[in-house]
Structures are given as structure tokens and as C-alpha cells.
Amino acid sequence: MRAPCDLLLTNATVLTMDQKFTMYQSSRVAVAGDSIVAVGPDADAYEAAETIDCLGRVVMPGLVNAHTHVPMALLRGLADDLRLDVWLMGYMLPVEREFVSPDFVRLGTGLGCAEMVRSGVTCFADMYYFEDAIAEATAEAGMRALCAQTVLRFPTPDATSYEESLARARDFIVRWRGHPLIVPAPAPHAPYTCTPEILRACAELAVEFDVPLHIHLSESVQEVEDSRRVNGMPVVPWVKKHGLFDAKVLAAHCVHVDDGELRTLKNVGAGVAHNPTSNLKLGAGIAPVARMLELGLNVGIGTDGAASNNDLDMFEETRLAALLAKGISGDPTALPARGALAMATRLGACAMHMNHLTGSLEPGKRADLIIVDLDPLHNVPAFGRDPNGVYAQIVYASKSTDVIDVMCNGRWLMRDRKLLTLDETGLREAARAQARRVDAFLSGREVSVLQKLVAVGGAVELESFEVQVKARVPSAEQVLAVIEGKKVTVVRSSRYHQFDTYWSFDDPDQGWLRYREDEFLNEAGNVTGARARLTLTGRTREADLGGVLLFRSRYLAPAAHSPRFYREYFRPAAEHVVEKDRRRWLLVYRGVEFYVHLDRLLNPPGDGYFIEVKSRTWSQRDAQDKAAVITELLALFGTSPDDTISDGYVALVAGRR
Ligand SMILES: [Zn+2]
């Protein structure tokens, strides 16, 4: 007598993707409840209420997307062909700060899950904010996931501090541990966005609840170089030193790792998620996957977020992984199709520390499986001579649209290409509506340089008014004599080496954006410190008070990024550089405080000395009074408003070109 089960898949080419790559022709898979009970000839001992004839079809494990940020499906195509920092700091983070909420991630998860189910994915590793809502939406969609709550050293859309996000991660893990579909985890985002304290705390949290830990490691050359410079060692030994590998780690990327680091990853049992499209698209490089596999590391394949891919198609990703390994090694035998498909299934599950549940068709594992149709033209013909031919067919010829049925945890998520747990039409409409809101936000920001500056600059000083004049002086001696004399009182003084980069825009009303690096000099002329600031100078000039100008609209922001970042972010029409030696005094003359700068232009050279006098002002009357006093001061310095360079150094430099 045959044993009962719930479902029998018959007449299938069964790719178990187990460790021995066992495969069966015209064979069966038996499912009972949420699990696989028998595969191959063993399944002949079962009978089921429902039988599905899979003639001409492949039954294989559902694909495992080993690294993604699933709600970012909503940001697909938002900003492309940009460098990582401009993409991340200029676009992703500002938009995330503005929009990411539980509703946003729920919708994004629905959209991402629908796309993944359609392409044969049954399990994925996520890392994002409001992971609670992501886990809920994933469980509703019926998919399996490692859901990791992000922890960063700076405020996030779901936490104002690292302590708060760590507490959120703990609550999340406590709530979801033991769920049939969701494995909760902490996700310290990356070593460069965390502190050693955060890495250690997250590892301890993961160990306490025996859950994995999800992190980005060694994604870019910059990250590794910074680690060497700041920490004195590359990324992997540094995180090891801070206890990260006490946890069961899933490390995304590992693009720039040396052999020693790979051995460390292997020895501590860490899994790796290879994200070929994302690494290529952001120009990060190509991970040494063939070497990782040679060392016995568990390497899965991930799509990364849809904002850097721009889809969640694991068929495409698997093919690319196989091709890239050959391309960079010059060896067409590197990473054969069978190995690539193992990465997309069993090895991915191993990397996520979830291989006891999924990743292969073996009795006792959950019933996470897909049925692939080999009838479409691009799959025809097929040859029987080499039994491994079917792996090559799936990896090199088949497409995600060939997946016709998807089951996860014994439940059908798609039958005959129709989604059963997700409302595709509703998701499409809601995602488009959300995109319109993001578009409006970014378009509003792009209208002015100031808005773009506010978006990445953090705190920006408000508009101010000042009277100022800048004039050529015949010599430095006369100025110094006045300052050392009795007519003025010096409150304080300082000296800088100043490097200014000025950017202008097609619309002159946007004014000039100046990136200024100050090197502070001591009496001996040695550098004692440095700072960088951004200033947006509006063109608006209120009045010309007899050669002295009343200006308004100067916006200051700390320059947290490199000049290259701002150049690529603001895309100015022109750029000019001015370098000078500046002596600066705050002095009082006739009861009024003035800043006086004595500048010697170094680049462009040969222009001699300039004096700049300025003071904050509050009213037209006050401005007129101060303008009169400035005119007197200029006379003392041996110059007059007639010698002014009214548009400043940049006009001097720009006019000469
Ligand atoms: Zn990522």
C-alpha cells in the first residue's frame, strides 16, 4: 500500500541540487504539508490527492536571492549611471529620509516579492528599515526570507540613534524568531557606516538569539583603502577583531578581498553573497568567486536592491555570474553552469545559514520548488548525450519567464504564471503613484542649487545681509601698519591657506557655489588644521553704496564630501579655482566691528595683494553708515572704492579665461 501525501509532481526532470547533484529523468517529487517527503524513485511509494504531470518540464528548488533590499523595488530607475557616493548620498539617502515608512516598505516588499515569485525565487535575504513591516508583507506573500533590520551609526528613517535601531533590531528578532517563513536578523549596514561598538553589539545580539547576521563587506576599493589607512588593516581582519564573526555572518559583496581574508571567511563559517550586476553597475569590480568556491566557501548569488540592478531577476544574475567568472579568468571552464545554479540554490541557502530549510529538493526540507517550462523556442532543442546539459540549458538559455509554477513552504504562490498571493494590478498602480510623489520631491529639489545643497548639506545657515568691498592694495606693508597702529583695535587674528573651487550654472540667478578648503597656519606658517565648507552666494545685490556693496543670500554648509562628489552631484556649467594666502582680522574701527582680509593671490599668480572689508548688517540705514566707515578704512589702507573688484576673485579669474 502506498503512503499518502498531499501532492505528487510526476514525469519531471528533477534537479535536486543536493550536494551530489542528484538528478532524475521522468521522475517524481512528493510533498506533504509544508515539506518534501520523497524525491525520485522513493516518491513512487506515495499516492496523493493531487497529481501534476510535469512532462517536458524541470522541477527544481526555488531560487535563493542571497542579498537584496526588497522595498527598493520602489526606487528602481530613480538614479542611474552615477558614482556610488553620489548615487547613495545624493539620491538614495535623501529620498529614503523623506519617504521610507512602514507603508512604503510594505508596498515595496509586495512589488519586489511579486517580481521575485514570477522569476522563480522562493527565498531571499533582505536588509532594510522597518523590517517588521517587510517581514509581515513577505509572510503574507508566502515567501521565505532572512529579514535583517539595519543598524547604522547615523539616524535612519526608522531610528534617531544607533541605540534605538539596535533596540528595534532586538524587538524585531524577539517577535519573529521561530516563524515558519521568516528568519529575523540584525544588519549592521557596513563597517564604514558602523562603529566597532555597533559591530560587536550586533554580533552579540545575533549570538544571543542564534540568528544570522547580514552585512555588506569590502564592496569597493575605496572602502578597503580607507580601512587600511584608518584601521591599519583591510576590512575582514578588522571586523574579525571586533567580534563580528562570533555570529553566523552573511557577507554581501566581498569584491576586494585577498586570499588570507577568504581563508578567514571560510574558517569562521561566513557565507558570501555575490552580486554581479550591482557590482558592475556601480563600478565596484568583480568578486573572486571561482577562488571562493575553490576554498569551499558558501557563495550565493544576490540581485542587491532594484535601485542598483535594476531588477530582481535571478536567472539573469546566475548567467552573469557564470559568464563573469570565465571572462575575468580567461578560462571557459571556470564556474560551470551546474556550479552557478548551485550558487543560486543550495549554496545561497548555506550562505544565509538556512540550508536546513531550503535550497535543495531533499526529504525533510521545506517544499520550496519551481517548475520550469522547457518548451519555449529559446530552450529548443535539448540533447540527452550529456546529462549535465540541462544545467547549461537552465543557466544559459532559459529565462525567468519560463517559470510557470512556484511553491514555497508547500503553498502555491504562482500557478500557470498567475500570482496567487499578490495583487499585481494593485501593486503596479500603487508603485506608480508612489513614484510620482518621489518625482515631485526630486524635481522640486532640482529647481535650485540651494535646494540641492540643503538636500545633501545638512544644516545650512540662513540668508544674511552684509556690506562688503574687495579692492586691490598697493602693498601689504601699509595695511599691516594700520592694523598694528592705534586707529583700530584688533579683537582676534588668524591666517589660512585657502583653496577655492567656484562653480557656476547655466542660469546665472543660481549664483556661485564655492567649495573652500582652509588650512590654518600658525605664526611660523605651518599647517595646524583644516576644514572644508560650501557657500552658495546669491547674485542678488541690494544696493551699491558708493562702491561698497550690500549683498544678501549667502548660504553656508559644512562640506562633508569631496569636491568631486559635489561636481558630479551639482553638474555645474563651469569651474574656476582660486588659491590664496589669507590673513584675517576681526577689528573695531570707529565703534564698528569689521572683518578684514589681506589676501595674496597664489593661483592665478602675479596679482599682488587685495584687501577685503566686510560687516554684517541689518537695515538699509545701518548699511549706509557702515559703507561710509568702510570707505574711510580703505583710504587708510591706501586704496579706495574705485579700485574694487566688485564681483570678487572668481570674476577676476573667470573674466581672464
Ligand atoms: Zn546591498
Image (spheres, rainbow, N blue to C red):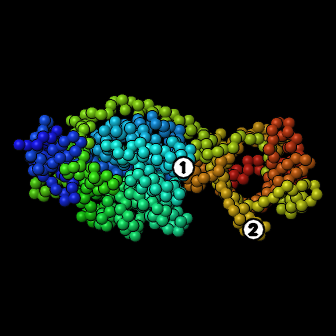
Q: Residue at x 50, y 68 (%)?
A: 233
Question: Which amino acid, mark 2?
Answer: Gly
Q: Residue at x 86, y 61 (%)?
A: 480
Q: Are marks 1 and 2 in contact (CB under 8 Å)?
A: no
Left or right of residue 250: residue 449: right
Mark toward the start of the polypeptide (1 vs 2):
1
Q: Position of residue 363 (x, y in %)?
A: 19, 50
Left or right of residue 167: residue 317: left
Quarter of the image with the C terminus in it: bottom right
What residue sits right under mark 2 in the picture? 525
Q: Nearer the viewer, residue 365 or 128?
A: 365
Dot 1 falls on a residue whose secondary structure is helix
Q: How far, Cα to Cα, is label 1 from label 2?
A: 41 Å
Mark 1 CB lies closer than 8 A to ligand 1 = no
Question: Which amino acid, mark 1?
Answer: Tyr
Dot 2 falls on a residue whose secondary structure is loop
What label sits on residue 397 in the rendered view? Answer: none
Identity of the residue furthest to the left in this view? 1
Left or right of residue 597: residue 21: left
Whether residue 284 appears in this view of the structure is no
Q: Position of residue 388 (x, y in %)?
A: 16, 57
What residue sits right under mark 1 in the picture? 162
Whether residue 223 appears in this view of the structure is yes
Q: Which of pointers 1 and 2 indicates the residue nearer the eye? A: 1
Q: Residue at x 74, y 64 (%)?
A: 521
Q: Nearer the viewer, residue 415 or 328?
A: 415
Q: Residue at x 73, y 50 (%)?
A: 648
Q: Position of residue 574 (x, y in %)?
A: 60, 50
Q: Quadrant of residue 583?
A: bottom right
Quarter of the image with the N terminus in it: top left
